[in-house]
Every structure is written in structure tokens, then in C-alpha cells.
Amino acid sequence: MKQIVVGVTGASGSIYAARLLDWFRSIQKQQEVEVSLVFSENAIKVWQWELQVPLPEDFPVYGYKDYFAPFASGSSLYEAMVIIPCSMGTVGRLAAGLSDDLICRAADVMLKERRKLILVPRETPLHAGHLENLLKLARWGAIVLPAMPSFYGHPRNLEELVDTIVLRVLDLLGFTLSYSRWGSETPITSV
């Protein structure tokens, strides 16, 4: 069974995390995957402001200061983490090696154990400090997948546009799904 941590920070773009969870619900019908969630303090506020829906209750949610969460240790079997959306504050703390909350601690575990860490920053424009921090994390092994949607699949609505990023995240996690890829005619399939 794949075990994956999803960290949600206070950057705008909660819809990216919500759509990722929608896809995980669909995937769980066919494959064994355990998804654990952790929201930063600001992520909860942004989620409620942007989406106007309650936090998900169908995945285990750990408090942002809960260092007893299983994925806070390298001895856990969690193989990957996605931080979506990833604030530049989180990027800065990660690049400084700070583990001042569960999201940063879990990300630090992924880096030190050479496991997959996918960062989906949602900020614009970026200053040199942001870029240097992202480069530093990429050199340490993180995958930086900016929330820059693609248009070649002709997305018909906001969900399909968001899914151009979310489906790339799922590709990187090893889930092979059928969707519009460069040079193909397969349309995006919504969950």
C-alpha cells in the first residue's frame, strides 16, 4: 500500500489540494493508497475562504504541531509527500532546515530519507530569494512543480484547468491515469 502525506499551506490555491483529494478518492476505489493530511494554521482559513466548504473528514487529518504523527519520523513507511499549495513561507523554512511545524518536519523527513517530496508553489511574481530557496530545495531532491496550468488539452472549466497540475502530481507519485498529454487527443477526465 502506498502511504502519502498531503500538506496544505496558507497560500492561495486550496482548490489544487481539494482536487488532489478528489482524485485520491477515485484512485482508492481501485488501488490501495493511504493519504494523510496536515493543514497549516493559515491553510484552514484560506480553505474556508476560497472553497467555502468544510475540511475533508474522509482522510486522517493531523494537527500542524502534532509531532507524534507517524510521518514525522523517518522510520515510517510513508513514501512521498506533496505540499499543495506550498507557500513561500514554507519554502523558506524548508530551505533553512527549520522543522517548526508538522508540514516542515514531514518534508524534512522526506528529504533526509531520500523519498519523494513534491512542492506545488502558488505565488507570483517570485523574487530572487524565492527562486534561490526553490533551487536549493531542488538540489536537495525536492521536485518543484509550480501551479502553472497547461492549455494544450483545451480545459473546458476551472476544475479541468486545475487538474492539469493535479494530474502531473499524480504522475510523479506513480499513478498512471488517462488524460490529455502533449501530442495526444485524450481529453481530461474529471472525477
Image: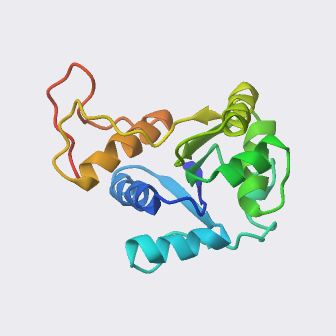
Horizontal side, residue 60 vs residue 150: left or right: right
Could you say which is closer to the camera, residue 2 or residue 127? 127
Image quarter for residue 39?
bottom right
Name the side, left or right, on which 10 lies relative to 177. right
Residue 130, horizontal then vertical, whole percent: 68, 39
Residue at position x 54%, y 48% in the image: 123
Q: Is residue 59 left or right of residue 139?
A: left
Q: Nearer the viewer, residue 4 or 17?
A: 17
Can residue 58 be seen in the rendering of this structure? Answer: no
Q: Is residue 11 left or right of residue 22?
A: right
Residue at horizontal 32 percent and vertical 34 percent from the top: 150
Give the image location of residue 168, x and y in percent. 41, 36
Q: Quadrant of the C terminus?
A: bottom left
Residue at the spot x=83%, y=55% of the render? 99
The image shows residue 181 at horizontal and vertical percentages of: 27, 27
In the image, farthest residue toward the top: 183
Picture layout, residue 29 above or below residue 55 = above
**Residue at the (66%, 73%) spot, across then down:** 41
Q: Is residue 152 positioned above or below 159 on the image?
A: above
- Residue 69: percent from the left, percent from the top? 74, 65
Q: Is residue 169 visible?
A: yes
Color encoding of the figure? rainbow
Number of marks drawn: 0
